[in-house]
Amino acid sequence: MAKEIKNAPQEQVAEAVSKTDLFFQQNKKWIIGVCVAAVVVTGCILGYERFIRAPKVAECRAQMFPAENAFKAGEYEKAFAGDGNFIGFEEIIDTYGSAADASAWMYAGVCQLQTGNYESAIAYLKKYDGKEPILAARAKACIGDAYVGLGDNKEALEWYSKAAGTADNMFAATYLLKAGIVCEEMGDNARALSLYKEIKDKYPQSIEGYEIDKYIARIDK
């Protein structure tokens, strides 16, 4: 009896191996086909990344330099639309799509914001998907600015709040102040006061923090 128990696991292993071998023999063509397909798909993906996408990304980055320089010079219309000598962010996005750096959408949105094309600015900025918190917060704040330009204070307040919650740093004080001012314009002084006091408590060393008492004083009488 002891001998039978001792050999049982070996017999079970042998049986399992036999079943596996039988399964392979019966489905050999299908298994090989799946493996070959996996290799082909992987090869296609790697080939696309190396020979198609990577060169396109490099070309896109080179095309962005002149537009970025125009943006830095405050030439927002030229940066967005180009000037005949170089293409602007609008065409960069249309031409290169996902191969364009995420910043292209930020640049395009800010250009449109600066030139008063608020709905277009919102559309571009909402597509910005950069992961860096400071820039992500800035994009949200710019959306808030665009909604202010459209006279939609409710939406502006929502986006300023999102911006302040995205990056907990000195920049958040700017977004909280904007949110507070919008609240005052909407007649919600209680919420405005709460936002101003948040700046005073959390960001006293910010530029807004140094001046926040005057905002608090005009409400908290």
Image: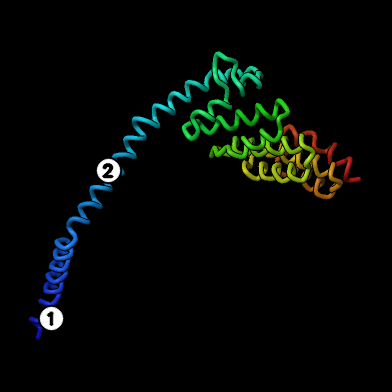
- Point out the tag, 2 or 1, that comes first from the N-terminus: 1
**Residue 33 horizontal side relative to residue 150, left or right:** left
Residue type at the position of mark 1: Ile
Mark 2, residue position: 40
How many other residues sit within 10 Å of disc 1, few (<14), some (14-19) or many (≥20)? few
Query: In the image, what residue type sits under mark 2?
Result: Val
Point out residue 168 in the picture as x, y percentages from the top left corner: 63, 42
> Residue 94's spot in the image, x, y percent?
53, 30
What's the residue at 50%, 28% (across, down)? Answer: 95
Outermost residue, top direction?
A: 85
In this view, 220 is above or below 141 = below
Outermost residue to the left: 3
Q: Quadrant of residue 105?
A: top right
| Element assignment for label 2 | helix
Residue at 71 percent of width and 46 percent of height: 158
Secondary structure beneath dot 1 equals helix
Q: Residue 120's image quarter?
A: top right
Taking the image as shown, residue 218 lies to the left or right of residue 73, namely: right
Q: Quadrant of the N terminus?
A: bottom left
Image position, residue 43 (x, y; %): 29, 40
Q: Depth-wise, is mark 2 or mark 1 nearer the camera?
A: 2
Percent across and percent down for residue 204 are: 73, 38
- Whether residue 185 is situated above or below residue 10 in the rendered picture: above
The quarter of the picture where residue 70 lies is: top right
Determine the residue located farthest toward the bottom in the rendered image: 1
Q: Residue at x 69, y 35 (%)?
A: 119
Mark 1 = which residue?
A: 5
Label 2 Cα crowd, 10 Å radius (few <14 / some 14-19 / many 20+) = few
Q: Any mark on residue 131, and which?
A: none
Instruction: Report the coloring of the rendering.
Output: rainbow
Contact, CB < 8 Å: mark 2 with mark 1? Answer: no
